[in-house]
Image (cartoon, rainbow, N blue to C red):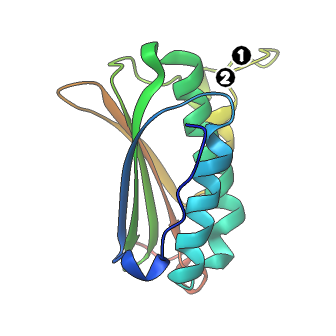
Amino acid sequence: MNHVTEYSATEVDGTYRMGFTVGAHSARHMRRILRMLLARWELAALADAAELALTELVANVVRHVPGRGCAVVILLRPRGLRVEVEDGSPSPPRAPGDVRPLAEDGRGLLLVDAVTDRWGTEGTATGKTVWFECDRPGLRGTRP
């Protein structure tokens, strides 16, 4: 993805979905889209955490998914934000607890775990979805 088309955030009703073939610079464009949506939804306070988590999930697609194809889904939920990255690889991501202490890679989901309220992975008929959720600031620490 080399170019982001401008669009009016008023056209977005709480769901954004787009398919991409990602590369080294794709996360920058996706962060921009995410930031615009969060501003529109009055959730700008979630931007730093959500942008970091999205960057890590996109980086995993670039590094580990043949063909680098994925779909990004950004959802406005009553509790806050949910972001899903779907790809065609059935291989689950390495769990944060499986990272060796001196490993040079594999720390992306540790970051996702640290900055989001919840995250997980689900198998699909064609691959998997890795998702995360960030609660509205007033809801943090309460049960979903």
Image: 16 above or below 63: below
Secondary element type, mark 1: loop
Question: Which residue is labeled 2 in the image?
Answer: 106
Question: Which residue is labeled 1 in the image?
Answer: 100
> Could you tell me residue 128's position as x and y percent?
32, 30
> Could you tell me residue 129's position as x and y percent?
35, 37
Secondary element type, mark 2: loop
> Could you tell me residue 40's position as x and y percent?
53, 82
Depth check: give the residue in front, 83 or 97. Answer: 83
First of labels 2, 1 by sequence position: 1
* Residue 140 in view: yes
| CB atoms of marks 2 and 1 within 8 Å | yes
Residue at 38% x, 17% y: name it: 91
Q: Residues within 10 Å of mark 1 (few under 14, many from 20)?
A: few
The residues tagged by marks 2 and 1 sit, at their Cα atoms, a distance apart of 8 Å
Total marks shown come to 2
Residue 125 quadrant = top left
